[in-house]
């Protein structure tokens, strides 16, 4: 499995603090996959993202991008931040201009593109993200779900190779969450690598191809969701929950579990129940 981003024994501490935010962290992000990073507040998720876009350099250790070590030159960092996009948990931290059109076009203008190309690419991503009707609406009049989609569009318009999302579904209603996840699945199917930091074990279980579990600045577990959650004792020791669907699955008779795959969505679980009851 090829990696697009790796950390090798990365240690980092913020100025004025004694504890390490990252403590000899070793992680690998598989290219082209959907990776969920889980862990409590303070486990290192946000700090890892800031390392990935070169905002902070390690105190020791090495960050690898496409199998090459980062050197943190101005030229390299500029290219890195075009290749790696970060969407913050709170869109208010990311949206700086008056309207979605202005905000989305800002990054392209910063990159020095001609105005005709800026217009074409901005209008294209507005259409793709179903935001055209909101293009000229004041940002402060948008709902939280709409703001999150605008923030995502502002990153996607730069066509990054790796997209980092910090708690992207936090505080969203169910419909807004489904819309956002559908868009993430679409862009990953087109070849983009996605990494999502989340506290939501249900989401990590149903969405991710690969999982990393962080604790006290270290990666303590990695693998597929099925591999991670099969070690239920380790998950509970870390103070994390098993996904509800998995708990329901484990409550079914062993004979049912032997001949069926564990469901990854409510629809899968409903079909499983319908199938099981039809056999009675």
Image: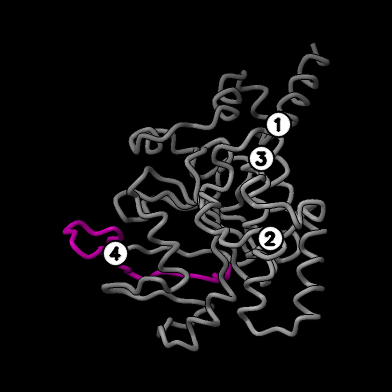
Q: Residue at x 71, y 66 (%)?
A: 191
Label 3: how many Cα within 10 Å (few below 14, some 14–19, many 20+): some
Q: Nearer the viewer, mark 3 or mark 1?
A: 3
Tell me, yes or no, whether the two marked residues, 3 and 2, touch with CB atoms within 8 Å. no
Rendered-image quadrant of the C terminus:
top right
Checking the image for residue 120, the label placed there is none
Tally of marks? 4
Quick check: is 70 in the magenta stretch? no
Residue bearing mark 1: 260
Report, in whole angstroms, how far the alpha carbon at label 2 lies from the one at label 1.
39 Å
Residue bearing mark 3: 177
Residue bearing mark 4: 24
Q: Horizontal and vertical percent for residue 150?
A: 67, 55
Q: Nearer the viewer, mark 2 or mark 4?
A: 2
Report, in whole angstroms, how far the alpha carbon at label 3 lies from the one at label 1.
28 Å
Report, in whole angstroms, how far the alpha carbon at label 1 lies from the one at label 4.
40 Å
Is 213 left, or right, of 263 in this rendering? left
- Of callouts 3 and 4, which one flags the residue occurring earlier in the amino acid sequence? 4
Is 83 left, or right, of 242 in this rendering? right
Q: Horizontal and vertical percent for residue 98?
A: 63, 59
Residue bearing mark 2: 153
In the figure, residue 97 lies in which quadrant? Answer: bottom right
Report, in whole angstroms, how far the alpha carbon at label 3 lies from the one at label 2.
15 Å
Secondary structure of the residue carrying tag 3 is: helix
Label 2: how many Cα within 10 Å (few below 14, some 14–19, many 20+): many
* Magenta residues, start to end: 1-23
- Of callouts 1 and 4, which one flags the residue occurring earlier in the amino acid sequence? 4
């Amino acid at each position: 499995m090829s990696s697009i981003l790796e950390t090798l024994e990365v240690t980092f501490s913020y100025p004025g603090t004694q504890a390490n935010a990252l403590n000899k962290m070793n992680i690998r992000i598989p290219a082209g996959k959907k990776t969920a990073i889980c862990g409590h507040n303070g486990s290192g998720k946000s700090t890892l993202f800031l390392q990935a876009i070169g905002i902070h350099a390690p105190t020791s250790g090495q960050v690898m991008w496409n199998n090459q070590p980062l050197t943190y030159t101005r030229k390299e960092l500029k290219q890195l931040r075009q290749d790696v996009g970060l969407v913050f948990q709170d869109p208010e931290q990311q949206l700086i201009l008056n309207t979605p059109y202005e905000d989305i076009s800002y990054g392209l203008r910063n990159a020095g593109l001609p105005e005709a190309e800026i217009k074409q690419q901005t209008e294209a991503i507005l259409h793709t993200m179903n935001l055209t009707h909101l293009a000229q609406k004041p940002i402060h009049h948008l709902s939280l779900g709409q703001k999150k989609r605008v923030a995502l569009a502002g990153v996607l318009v730069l066509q990054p190779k790796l997209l980092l999302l910090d708690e992207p579904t936090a505080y969203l209603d169910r419909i807004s969450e489904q819309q956002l996840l559908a868009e993430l699945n679409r862009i990953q199917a087109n070849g983009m690598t996605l990494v999502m930091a989340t506290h939501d074990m249900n989401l990590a279980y149903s969405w991710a191809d690969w999982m990393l579990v962080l604790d006290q600045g270290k990666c303590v577990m990695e693998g597929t969701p099925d591999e991670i959650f099969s070690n239920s004792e380790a998950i509970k020791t870390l103070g994390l929950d098993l996904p509800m669907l998995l708990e329901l699955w484990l409550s079914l008779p062993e004979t049912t579990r032997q001949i069926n795959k564990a469901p990854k969505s409510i629809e899968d679980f409903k079909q499983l129940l319908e199938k099981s009851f039809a056999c009675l």
